[in-house]
Image: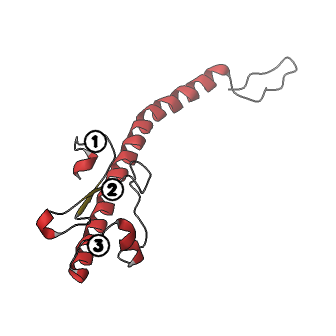
Amino acid sequence: MAYPTSSGKRAAGFTLIELLVVLAIVSVLLTLAVPRYFSSIEGSKTAVLSENLQRVRDAIDKFYGDTGRYPANLDEMVEKHYLRSLPVDPVTDRNDSWTLLPPDPERGSGIYDIKSGAEGATADGRAYSSL
């Protein structure tokens, strides 16, 4: 609300009370929105991690089906075009933090399974390394 000045004209602008009310409303909205934003980021990292693990595991199975052996490393799978590139662990933001698991000794050597090397747990309490 603009109040008249001594010259009779109305002053342009907002009062301090109006600005404080707007700031209070904005802060309440941010208080509600920010926690949901960060939880959605964590949920999407978990979804991307699960998808990356599923695709690499599928590629390992196809490699074994085609060659009769497990790949020696992930780079071999990229070289033979089973993967376009090494997937990134979205929790650690690195592609070298994977935990590579060998097969049983009677099934040969190489990479049988892959797990995340990230520490911590998902929002539902499962460890990243158990996905």
- Quadrant where the N terminus is found in the figure: top right
- The front one of 91 and 72 is 72
What residue did someone put label 2 on?
49
Answer with mark 1 or mark 3, whichever residue precedes in sequence: 3
Q: Measured along the vertical axis of the image, is residue 21 above or below residue 63?
A: above
Q: Position of residue 106 (x, y in %)?
A: 11, 67
Cα separation between marks 2 and 3: 15 Å
Q: Is residue 62 visible?
A: yes
Q: Determine the residue positioned at 14% across, 69% down.
A: 107
Would residue 27 be found to the left or right of residue 124 on screen?
right
**SS at circle 2:** helix
Q: Position of residue 22 (x, y in %)?
A: 57, 29
Contact? badges 1 and 2 (CB < 8 Å): no
What residue did someone put label 1 on?
121
The mark closer to the camera, 1 or 3, is 3
**SS at circle 1:** loop
Q: Position of residue 33 (x, y in %)?
A: 43, 38
Would residue 4 be found to the left or right of residue 86 on screen?
right
